[in-house]
Image: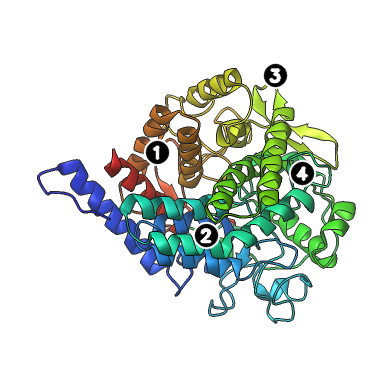
Amino acid sequence: MRTTPSQDGPRQEAGELALQAAAVLRKNDMGGWTRAAPTLYPHQWSWDSAFIAIGLAHVDIRRAAAEIRSLLNHQWKNGKVPHIVFNPAAPPDSYFPGPEHWASAAPDAPDASSHPAMTSGLCQPPVHAIAARRILEVAESRNEGIEDARRFLRDVYAKLFAWHRYLATNRDRENSGLVTIFHPWESGTDNSPRWFEALERVEVGEGLSYERLDLKHVKDPSERPVQDTYDRFIWLVELIKRTGCDDSAIYTTSPFLVKDVLFSAILVRANEALLEIAEIVEAPYGDRDTIRAWIQRGHGGLDERWDPELELCLDYDLRAGCSLGTRTIAGLSPLFSGSGPAARRKSLLETLDSPFFAGDPDLRWPLPPSTSPGEPRFHPRSYWRGPVWPVLNWLLCWSLERSGEAERAGTLRRASLEQLADGRFGEYYEPFTGEPLGSDGQSWTAAVALDWLANEEAL
Ligand code: 9WN
């Protein structure tokens, strides 16, 4: 990261912030992979890793590539990229449900016989191809590490293709273009009110006994999910484990099966990135046709989920056969994927800027809360129920740029950098006061700051 002349105040501050962000990533570096946060999340999380790689690209291309490579080393035989790769050196009581809890649940895992388990049995949104493509872009813009980045793309292309094929098949038996999630943790937006009604339908069975560890790491328990929600999370893990993480069995038996529009929107963009990678590595034409078809199907699926009344894109509960109509940032999914007619995207940009989201006059910065402040289940401190998440804003910014909305993306980026200017790199932020919440020193927040700062410098 280039430092800036001292007579230039804001640039000097940007240089300082970049150094602080890089220091967070260094501190969380476990040697070839990065823990998501210093104590709350001592393992490698799937989509966190992708964002982390984007940030690392501005520091060291090979290290950025290593982040994704190490995650993909634990890809399952069926193509699934696991949501957590456990750190064998993490203290036993540092995270629940940890490796012991997942043990023997995963015959498809590459290290299935390992006790404790090396990975969880879930997955998370597929930001990886976006990150892989970005690594080469950053290398080219810095004119550094270009050959390393190209070699990395050649090495990981087949794995990324297998990952996307898993999502297009095992997770979309309906050929709808929309990904089915088996657990709110798979959405990455875990206790968002998006899942409330679907979770209500999950009846927790007998004999659930466990100790929550997450509450030990935050000052205020209201920043974490309520007990009732957590019980359902753990019960769903139990049911998934009972099937041996078998996707067909889960499809048949699980009480929670939801088409997630945000996950699906990210997959559309990830497929666009994968197509670019396929061209760079000269992958077979058949692959490229397949990826193009996935992109088309993804757009189609998202179009189908448009709700003209709420004027948002809605998740769909496969079990109950109904839409899940809560006003959250996921409703803006067509802005993330670039789907739908231009008029719809224009109206969504207006919604983004309206008091439902970033236009609420009481917000500390004009940044969209994860759940609209008007929602009855909005909570400004509880994670995914209201706080602002910098990583989602990174995705939104990046997608807006790709859709030709550079000015709108720039506004979002600058407001985000103001939010992060205190150098604490919170996991998420209280929308009205701007207080950082959850974990400080959260790796992916530092990572997106690095990417944004580089973007500002390039202007
Ligand atoms: C469960 C690591 C992860 C993020 C998720 C975020 C949170 C875990 C938890 O932390 O989820 O996966 O224990 O709450 O919701 O998006 O990947 O940062």
- C-alpha distance separating marks 1 and 4: 33 Å
Where residue 5 sits: x, y (%)? 13, 49
* Colour mapping: rainbow
Amino acid type for the residue under numbered disc 4: Val
* Front-most of residues 354 and 84: 84
Does 259 sit left or right of 406 as displayed? right
Name the residue carrying label 2: 153
Badge 4: few (under 14), some or many (20 or more) residues near its Cα, within 10 Å? Answer: many
Mark 3 or 1: in front is 3
Badge 3: few (under 14), some or many (20 or more) residues near its Cα, within 10 Å? Answer: few
The quarter of the rendering in which ligand 1 is drawn is bottom right
Where residue 147 sits: x, y (%)? 41, 62
Q: At x 9% / y 44%, what residue is drawn?
A: 7
Amino acid type for the residue under numbered disc 1: Thr
Where residue 354 sits: x, y (%)? 50, 22
- C-alpha distance separating marks 2 and 4: 32 Å
Name the residue carrying label 3: 309
Name the residue carrying label 4: 258
Asked if ligand 1 lies within 8 A of label 3, the reply is no
Corner quadrant of residue 135: bottom left
Amino acid type for the residue under numbered disc 2: Leu
| Residue 268 shows in the view | yes
* Front-most of residues 18 and 151: 151
